[in-house]
Amino acid sequence: MSGQWIAGAPVSFGVWGPHTGAPDGDGDAILRTLAAQGYTGSELGDTGFLGDPDRTADVFAAHGLAPAGVYVGLPLARGEWSAQGRAAFALTCRTLRAVVDRHALTAGDHGAPAARIVLADDGAPGLDAPRDPADRSSGLDDRAWARAVDVLAEAVTIACEHGLARTFHPHLGTFVESTWEVDRLLATTPLGVTLDTGHALLAGTDPVEAADRWAGRIDHVHVKDVRLAPLHAARRAGPASLRDWWTQANVPLGRGDVDLAGVLDAVRRTGYAGWLVVEQDAAPHGGPQLAQFAADQERNLRVLRELLGD
């Protein structure tokens, strides 16, 4: 594993869910910032955030960044696609394909890891409260999971039609977050898994142990640091929206409870050679925040490089 292929992500600048980020941090400014700091790539952010497929490819090319992937939530609990959802997913694939092709055209044979469609469950009402990782009754039953597998298979088919690599991201507040749910995913689908160090720890999975447990199936890594205290406080308070405490749990690298050095050593032992995507999920508050977000990401890159020995 090399520290060369380190990507940033718009989510670290407040771009997630329905948000559009800090008012002074549009997509062009975010990618310009990441490129200037020395990141070699970025994930795309919400589909449409950077514009249509051609415009998104233009922005990446303008800043010389390689595409690392794009996150997409799927209706696993519902077990079926809507026509609108299927069309939106196809647009996401076209967008990533456009960026991949433009980068190959402008950068040539650069050896960057594959850009991946990062699949995830989009959750369901009632899952916002922190779940007990040992309570299997809160997960999808076998019949519902079989339908979820059908949705995943269709997503894989569409991604394959666009020539895109795939991975699955276990995510807090969804039906694939706990260790046993990831084990089931890997046992019933051909998908690889994204190791998100923050989501794993908050879902009750030691990310260092996960790197060994899922060795050979980890094909994407989100490097995130989190504090456990907001999770424990949310559990004590009873049902709580994930949005109420999620960004409180996210902290700069090295300031949380994730054993980042241990995770990096573990994935290095397995021969992992994909992207390391730095994420520090942040929420916009309606005022200028680009400088604050940029400072955090500059520091995060420095800390990660130190951990890698670069």
Image (tube, rainbow, N blue to C red):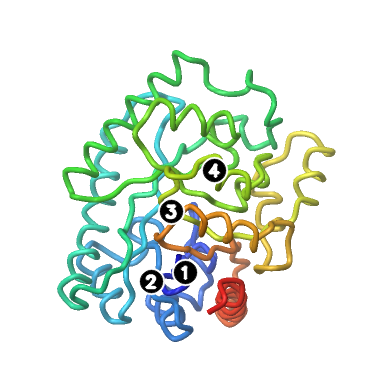
Q: Is disc 2 placed on a helix, strand or loop?
A: strand
Query: Rounded to the nearest whole Å, what is the CA distance between mark 3 and mark 1?
Result: 13 Å
Q: Nearer the viewer, residue 118 or 80?
A: 118
Marked residue nearer the N-terminal end (3 or 4) = 4
The residue under label 4 is which amino acid type? His
Q: Residue furthest bottom?
A: 36
The residue under label 3 is which amino acid type? His
In which quadrant of the rendered image does the N terminus lie? Answer: bottom left
Q: Are marks 3 and 4 in contact (CB under 8 Å)?
A: no
**Which residue appears at 30% of the width and 80% of the height?**
64
Q: Can you tell which of label 2 and label 3 is closer to the viewer? A: 3
Q: Position of residue 195 (x, y in %)?
A: 52, 49
Marked residue nearer the N-terminal end (2 or 3) = 2
Query: Rounded to the nearest whole Å, what is the CA distance between mark 2 and mark 1?
Result: 6 Å
Left or right relative to 216: residue 90: left
Query: Rounded to the nearest whole Å, what is the CA distance between mark 4 and mark 2?
Result: 22 Å
Q: Nearer the viewer, residue 136 or 83?
A: 136
Query: Rounded to the nearest whole Å, what is the CA distance between mark 2 and mark 3?
Result: 13 Å
Residue at which label 1 appears: 8
Q: Are marks 2 and 3 in contact (CB under 8 Å)?
A: no
Residue at which label 2 appears: 41
Q: Are marks 2 and 1 in contact (CB under 8 Å)?
A: yes
Residue at which label 3 appears: 220
Marked residue nearer the N-terminal end (2 or 1) = 1
> On the image, which quarter does residue 258 sit in?
bottom right
